[in-house]
Image: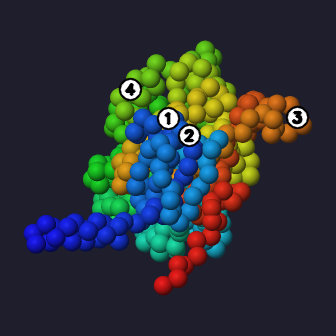
Amino acid sequence: MKKLTFFILAVFVAFGNLAWAQPYHVVIKGGHVIDPKNNINGIMDVAILDGKIAKVAKNIDATGARQVVKAKGLYVTPGIIDIHTHVFFGTNMDQTYSNGPNALPPDGFTFRNGVTTIVDAGCSGWRDFEAFKKQTIDASQTRVLALLNIVGSGMRGGKFEQNIDDMDAKATAEMAQKYPDLVVGVKLAHFNGHDWTPTDRAVEAGKLANKPVMIDFGGSKPTLSIEELFLRRLRPGDIFTHCFGQLATREPILDVATNKVKPFVWEAQKKGVIFDVGYGGISFAFSQAIPALKSGFFPNTISTDIHTGSMNNAMKDMLNVMSKFMAMGMDLPAVIKASTWSPALAIKRPELGSLTEGSEADVAILDLQDGKFAVRDTGYFGFFDYTGHKIEGKQKLTCEMTIRKGRIVYDLNGIADPIVVRPRAQ
């Protein structure tokens, strides 16, 4: 009798486990996985269940999966993170980037580039962040985080961004602390003048909120000293954006006379200052980037500074910027790291930027096209900056698929099977 009871119990448990076992929702098969956090760089499968990364391994059984993605010949990476964007779009025509016409709706450019997380870089300040949250953050499929402008009214342009009296460190920090999951730092942008007060107030707000600051020097004649900025005013973990800019009103990191990175720049990066690309409209020049990369100075993070003025010019989009850095000598794993795991660390969100099992399933599937796709059969792709300087590269990244929170949100060529998941019959 005891044996029979034990047998029935064992059968019940076995069938119970089968009943509770749930096939994966998505299995990505045969792609080349690059996951810098977890030191993965090889052919692997990725399984997704309930919006989370369930497994990364070779030859995952896809039987019963709702969707199978054939990724052979493609690269599978964590969802890309762009930490310098401008997305507080609106209809106030005189407010530029703050609820104005110069900013962009996030979902229109992110997923087609494999981007799943963006950081709005200072469009809103403490006065209008909650309007930005309601209008953009809460309404977007893309994960939208924010750097609060030290100017209370954000990037409204003109006199508003020059108003030192509206640079309130305490109010900025309080708003950041009110929304700790959304506000990842403080931004200084577009201030023109030989004055350290805006920088100091931004850093003060960062200290009060325990958040990093991102510094964008608007301009100054004479220029403000970046050696003083890096070594005496910024903390480890603070971010210097537009790091490869070369403008008369900003001191560059590369000595244009010697074509060498200034010694204190190396010291600053070693100290922990984060050098961010922040490409933008006129804030990136090959004359700075090419010699710097040749000397071994690589950016910590790659970002776009995307807005209406940059997206249709030399910058274009995140994958174009990443492709430029490959053309300049960074290898693909380094570029992926600078666009996923490193930015996650820069904004102190280590739960992002990787394919760690149990993490939210944000995934990019990329195609690395070679020169045979280039125009006019030259064998090369052309990349240029705003000055007209052009370089050629044999490889260019494009996005085949983007997965956000475990759901396919962009599929360029229909590589998911089935393409559409229909409700199952009850």
Which is more foreground, mark 3 or mark 2?
A: 2
Inter-mark Cα distance, 2 to 1: 7 Å
Residue 115 location (% of width, % of height) = 56, 53
Q: Which residue is mark 4?
A: 270
Instruction: Spot the residue most to the top.
Output: 258
Q: Dot 3: what SS? A: helix
Callout 2–callout 1 Cβ contact below 8 Å: yes
Q: Nearer the viewer, residue 142 or 188?
A: 142
Q: Dot 2: what SS? A: strand
Inter-mark Cα distance, 4 to 3: 43 Å
Residue 394 location (% of width, % of height) = 74, 31
Residue 94 appears anywhere in the view: no
Q: Which residue is mark 1?
A: 41
Inter-mark Cα distance, 4 to 2: 32 Å
- Crowdedness near tag 1: few (<14), some (14–19) or many (≥20) residues, C-alpha within 10 Å: some
Callout 3–callout 2 Cβ contact below 8 Å: no
Q: Name which residue type carries label 2.
A: His
- Crowdedness near tag 3: few (<14), some (14–19) or many (≥20) residues, C-alpha within 10 Å: few
Position of residue 12 in the picture relative to residue 56 (left or right): left
Position of residue 373 in the picture relative to residue 282 (left or right): right
Inter-mark Cα distance, 3 to 1: 31 Å
Question: Which residue is found at the position 28% from the left and 51% from the top?
Answer: 210
Inter-mark Cα distance, 1 to 4: 26 Å
Q: Dot 4: what SS? A: helix
Q: Earlier in the sequence, mark 4 or mark 2?
A: 2
Q: Which residue is mark 3?
A: 377
Q: Earlier in the sequence, mark 4 or mark 3?
A: 4
For residue 32, which numbered disc appears in the image?
2
Callout 3–callout 1 Cβ contact below 8 Å: no
Q: Name which residue type carries label 3.
A: Asp
Question: Which residue is found at the position 52% from the left and 82% from the top?
Answer: 425
